[in-house]
């Protein structure tokens, strides 16, 4: 009998968790996603988001050089990102490998090998990603507005190093640019402004 009650409890919890995953309407997903982009890039950016069944899909085709990703409804709080379209092959490959169940290290190693073999192309020039995040308490799901959000910046510069850029390997003060993953395909400048 205890086993039956336990099984029912697990089943109810699973239904409750699934019921709590609410997929916002496409227009709201788009409005929130583009908050991460510079203002002059928002209206024409391509936007990926989520269908009512939770599958990942294109919500809007873009006409400029930006791609935005809507907030993942299965995760706590709000986190959206936009990046230069030249980063799309790198990002898409990461999404595919993640869907296949690869670990972060496996994804890194596979993309590193594929970039070196020229199977996967990285931008030849620096390319930027913008990430905008905040708490669910500060988010209005009816309007798609996030108050008191935090913006950080990532500039991909494949195979750059501290020596070739003059950037440190860690920031000495909040907001100081630094280089992460130096000497690899995923070398990038991190800029995390000081939080309020």
Image (cartoon, grey):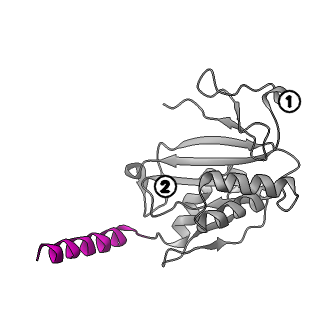
Query: At 84% from the left edge and 52% from the top edge, which residue is drawn?
Result: 123
Note whether residue 180 is visible: yes
Q: Position of residue 99 (x, y in %)?
A: 59, 67
Q: Position of residue 160 (x, y in %)?
A: 82, 37
Q: Position of residue 78 (x, y in %)?
A: 48, 53
- Magenta stretch: give its range: 1-22
Reading the image, the residue beneath label 1 is 164
Secondary structure state at the residue bearing disc 1 = helix
Mark 2 nearby-residue class (10 Å; few <14, some 14–19, many ≥20): some
Q: Is residue 5 magenta?
A: yes
Left or right of 149, for residue 37: right
Q: Position of residue 140 (x, y in %)?
A: 42, 57
Q: What's the distance in space between the residues labelled 2 and 1, CA to CA?
A: 40 Å
Which of the 4 image quarters holds residue 93? bottom right
Quarter of the image for the N terminus: give it: bottom left
Reading the image, the residue beneath label 2 is 145
Numbered disc in front, either 2 or 1: 1
Q: Is residue 146 above or below residue 182?
A: below
Query: At 45% from the left edge and 58% from the top edge, which residue is drawn?
Result: 75
Note whether residue 45 is visible: no
- Marks counted in the figure total 2
Q: Is residue 42 magenta?
A: no
Query: At 80% from the left edge and 42% from the top edge, which residue is drawn?
Result: 157
Which of the 4 image quarters holds residue 122? bottom right
Secondary structure state at the residue bearing disc 2 = strand
- Viewer-proximal residue, 195 or 9? 9
Q: Mark number for residue 106?
A: none
Mark 1 nearby-residue class (10 Å; few <14, some 14–19, many ≥20): few
Which mark is first along the chain, 1 or 2?
Answer: 2
């Amino acid at each position: 009998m205890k086993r039956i009650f336990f099984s029912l409890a697990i089943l109810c919890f699973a239904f409750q968790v699934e019921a709590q995953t609410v997929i916002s309407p496409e227009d709201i997903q788009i409005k929130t996603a583009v908050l991460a982009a510079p203002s002059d890039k928002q209206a024409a950016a391509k936007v990926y988001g989520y269908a009512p069944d939770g599958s990942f899909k294109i919500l809007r085709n873009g006409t400029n050089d930006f791609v935005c990703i809507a907030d993942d409804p299965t995760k706590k709080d709000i986190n959206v990102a936009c990046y230069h379209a030249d980063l799309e092959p790198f990002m898409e490959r990461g999404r595919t490998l993640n869907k296949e169940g690869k670990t972060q290290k496996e994804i890194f190693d596979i993309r590193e090998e594929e970039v070196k073999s020229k199977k996967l192309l990285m931008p030849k020039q620096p390319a930027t990603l913008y990430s905008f995040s905040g708490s669910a308490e500060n988010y209005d799901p009816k309007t798609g507005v996030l108050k008191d959000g935090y913006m950080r910046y990532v500039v991909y510069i494949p195979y750059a190093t501290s020596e070739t850029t003059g950037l440190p390997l860690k920031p000495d003060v909040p907001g100081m640019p630094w280089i992460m993953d130096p000497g690899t395909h995923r070398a990038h400048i991190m800029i995390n402004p000081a939080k309020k």
